Amino acid sequence: MNAFHQRYINDSELPENRQTDNLLGAIFESAPVCIVSYRALRNDAHEIIDFKPLLLNERAVTTCGRSRQEIMDATLLELFPPLQGSALLTDYLTTTQSGEPQRNDYYIPPFGGWFDVSVNRIGPDEIAAIFIDITARKEAELQMRQQADLLTQISQSMQMAVSGHLPVRDEQGRIIDFQYTYFNEKAKAWLPVDWRQVVGQTVRTMAFSKNSDQTIARMASVVETGEPVQFDVITPDGRVFFNIVARSGEGTVSTFIDVTAQRQAEENLRELKSVSERQTSLLQSILDASLTAIACYDAVCDEQGIVTDFQYTLANQTTLAIMNRTPDELYGKTICEVNPALQGSGVVEEYIRVYETGQPVVMERENKGRYYYVSLVKFGDGVLTSSIDITESQNYRSQLETANVALQQSNSNLQSFAYVASHDLQEPLRKIKAFGDLILNEYSAQLPEHGQDMLRRMQSAAERMSGLIRDLLALSRLTTQKRNFAPVNLENLVNEILSDLETTVAETGASVSVGVLPTVQGDALQLRQLFQNLLSNALKFRRSEQPSSIQVESSRVRARDIQPVLLTATPVNDANSVDATSAGNPIPDPLKQYYVLTVTDNGIGFDSSRHGETIFGAFQRLHGRSGTFSGTGIGLAIAKKVVENHNGAIVAHSHEGEGARFSVYLPIRS
């Protein structure tokens, strides 16, 4: 027994201390926490094997669920065997042996709850433990975590963007800025930069709003008053976001959606108004927040119970704006009273059919020069309509149809040219060559050497003209041919091309290495033309003093790792081409993957900083018509057109005398 317990017993026997002892005993027994003191029990090896209760208060007795006598007569592990090997028992041992106090939160199954346990040594082999019941706090924390997880899941699944912020204060405690702390997936997609570069930065630093001071002031008012605010944020690039900011803890949470198109059409619309007292506040908020025109109607019957018309019972703000009416001017009136032209027009009959059959109907309607996509469904004792303004889509469709007609005419002209090139133009050339051969074979002896040389030049020019026409025909067919995409094994295709070029490879002493190439979705014939031209050029433009070495390899990259200009460039010298990029489509998803197919050689090379784009134009020959390199200057134009037909890109990297590398980017399709 330690000095504390001995003094407690001895001093309590003194009359002058009994009153104090009684007071201390009352405090000990009535304490709202569990207090227990133990003595360590050791075996023959002097190892602690258990603990014997010495003193405990009433709260400890109640919590243990045993009588005081039962507790005092037993050891700790006899009372609660599950504590054997527990972290709590480890704390008891640590404090007993080292004297170091321990404090931790534990869930104690015998007690059925969580406890904040403090353990202190009060004497040799004696400790005191204080148990504070924190079950309610732990359950609240768990509930808060569950709520936080739920809110996070809801945030990530929302179609609206969400961001979180914490206030930045000056020395006087005034809010001077807000720090970004969180973005959901939708917000990350809308950010002009990678979201990881934004988290930790401030609203003023990132300057996503044209008026950052005003935005910060509104957010500060939310923190200070607790009242949410709604406002538009205009970004430096002109986009408009409808923003709802509410207080969240010490900071704010912002929910926003891109309303650029809507604000352009309705610049003066600042907030959505209430349209009906019959709606609940939730339904009213949903309807007024919708950019779709929504209206409800009750069926109007004649004396025989036959539906003849429909009466307005509800219309959201968008509907009122389209009709240029107020609720008082609309509610209670029938659709035929509002628009007499609908009587007998078939529209009312369509409403009646939906009401009677319950089958929804979708149709397009014109109203005052604008077009709407209208959905009709049965709703209660009437019908509900939702209408979306598709005027811009209709205009775009009309423009697209006009462009398609022009494109078809252009393709028709190209097909006519191809026919002329393949028949009418080739025939005179064949005759020129035939008669030239006849003159050289039959009359060369009668011609002077100068005359024979002129005939041979004529033959060479005719042959070049014939090749040029064939290449132009191939280029035109790439524009007009129907694309038949199917899986193409590029490794097999390249090996087939090398088999065709086997003689050239052998004659030049070239070495060609082909790595593992993928299977892609594409037009096999066009892809053959692509690699045929690239490999032929690599063999042709070689250095005389060194055998050619050519490598064909493949890798993968994401769109974000490719120069944006490569994926959005308009085809060179090909104004008639219409593809995904030249039609004005935005830059692809930065996570979209591409195959990179490279053809590298050690040939004569060229200055790609000067000719990197021009070499892909038709009739572009860097080495002229003289010298040892023949050709029409159309091969790389064909290669570029093939790549564009596959929604890809091609780029050249080279220095004079150092070889060349052509990189082809083809999208990976699932």
Image (cartoon, rainbow, N blue to C red):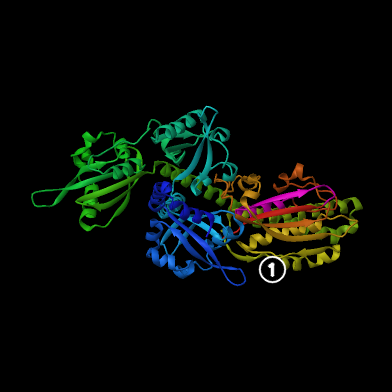
- Local secondary structure at mark 1: helix
- Outermost residue on the left side: it is 303
- Outermost residue on the front side: it is 15
- Identify which residue, 161 or 182, lies in the foreground: 182
Which residue appears at 89% of the width and 54% of the height?
447
User: In the visual, does 219 lie left or right of 192?
Assistant: left
Rendered location of residue 192, percent (x, y): 56, 41
Which residue appears at 50% of the width and 39% of the height?
165
Q: Is residue 260 visible?
A: yes
Queried whether the magenta region covers residue 650, the answer comes back as: yes
Tag 1: amino acid? Asn
Considering only vertical position in the picture, is 622 above or below 237? below
Rendered location of residue 44, percent (x, y): 60, 72
Considering only vertical position in the picture, is 385 above or below 518? above
Instruction: Please state the extent of the stretch shown in magenta in the rendering.
Output: 633-658
- Outermost residue on the bottom side: it is 44
Which residue appears at 19% of the width and 47% of the height?
298
Q: Is residue 264 visible?
A: no
User: In the visual, does 369 lie left or right of 558?
Assistant: left
Q: Quadrant of residue 288?
A: top left
Tally the numbered discs.
Answer: 1
- Identify which residue, 33 or 88, lies in the foreground: 33
Rendered location of residue 51, percent (x, y): 51, 65
Q: Dividing the image into 4 quarters, which one contains the C terminus?
A: bottom right
User: In the visual, does 306 lie left or right of 510?
Assistant: left
Q: Which residue is mark 1?
A: 492
Rendered location of residue 417, percent (x, y): 62, 51
